[in-house]
Amino acid sequence: MGGVAVVTDNSAGIPDELVAELGIRIVPVDVLVDDVALTAGVSIDVAEAVKDGKKVTTSRPTPDAFVKVFESLARDGYEQIVVVTLSSKLSGTFDSAVIAARTSPIPVTVLDSRSIGLGLGFSVINAARTSQTGSSITQILEVVERSIASSQVFFYVNTLEYLKRGGRISPTSALLGTALSVKPIMTVVDGEVVLKEKVRTKAKALAELVNLAVQCARTCDPALIGLQYFGDRSLVDHCALMLAEQLPDVDLLISEVSPVIGVHAGPGLVGISVARGASKRIET
């Protein structure tokens, strides 16, 4: 077969049909409900489990999980592998991939997306699309680096409590948001989740999410915009309509956020990711 394989973790939230179309290999970050890991094929509404107060946590992939994927790709005839992971400041997934790369039967380059959700996902999609054109490893890495540099992620959460519980923001930041009874808009800066803005109502928060995305999209050509939700899709559909009015020629990719991200943000999450695309269209 030859060529360059693209690998990521399931926190990217790339829809299954797009994963299959682009030949992306996924290494799972485990979700544990009441200390029991969800295995493949088990159906459970993780958002409801979080709402119900069950103990829901995540666990990074082991280096061995990556090694098995690398060995499988080598057997399939690939010559090189590019791995793009969620932010190393939020998970040990990047470290596991780096360790696994040392014993891979074929060369592996591991990149830290410094992002989450489709902020990571678009870098992976761009890499896979570029690989499918027969591009060199150097060209693919250049595309990924440009995508990472252009990526912006903004998301609304009902409460900062879940981010505080998971250690994704400081208790002081969470207390500030709760004390002021605000609707927080978060962003990712250099791989870390930070509070960007505080607004008073959910409607204003969604309008500001769209405004931020439109501003970013106008600096990217072509622009890729992804919308993600956890539990309730209706708010994302509302944002999609507002985006379509302002950016009628931009493709929108809508998916449910991976439970790996959702458990740390909580039900009601609405996220918008923007990045520079490697091609004019995303077909799903």
Image (cartoon, rainbow, N blue to C red):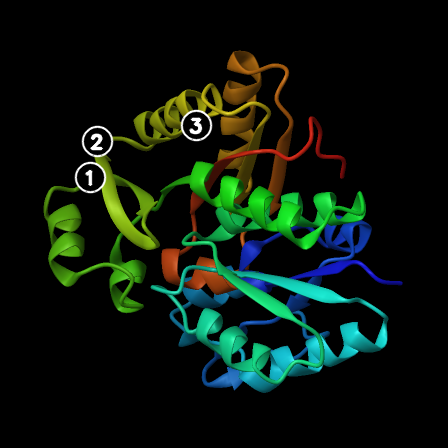
Residue 230 location (% of width, % of height): 50, 51
Label 1 belongs to which residue? 182
Task: Indicate which disc, 1 or 3, sits on the residue closer to the N terminus.
Answer: 1
Q: Is residue 199 visible?
A: yes
**206 shown above or below 130:** above
Residue 65 location (% of width, % of height): 62, 81
**58 shown above or below 247:** below
Residue at 64% in and 43% down? 126
Task: Indicate which disc, 3 or 2, sits on the residue closer to the N terminus.
Answer: 2
Residue at 63% in and 50% down? 138
- Residue 165 horizontal side relative to residue 282, left or right: left
Rendering quarter of residue 200: top left
Query: Where's the C terminus, which quadrant?
Result: top right
Residue at 73% in and 54% down? 19
Any mark on residue 200, and which? Answer: 2
Please identify, in this view, whether the residue under mark 1 or under mark 3 is nearer the observer.
3
- Give how far apart the Cα atoms at labels 3 and 2 are: 19 Å
Q: Is residue 232 visible?
A: no
Label 3 sits on what residue type? Ala
**195 shown above or below 91:** above
Please identify, in this view, whether the residue under mark 3 or under mark 2 is nearer the observer.
3
Label 2 sits on what residue type? Arg
**257 shown above or below 51:** above
Label 3 belongs to which residue? 213
- Residue 278 horizontal side relative to residue 110, left or right: right
Label 1 sits on what residue type? Val
Query: Where's the N terminus, which quadrant?
Result: bottom right
Residue 282 location (% of width, % of height): 71, 34
SS state under label 1: loop
- Residue 183 horizontal side relative to residue 65, left or right: left
Rendering quarter of residue 247: top right
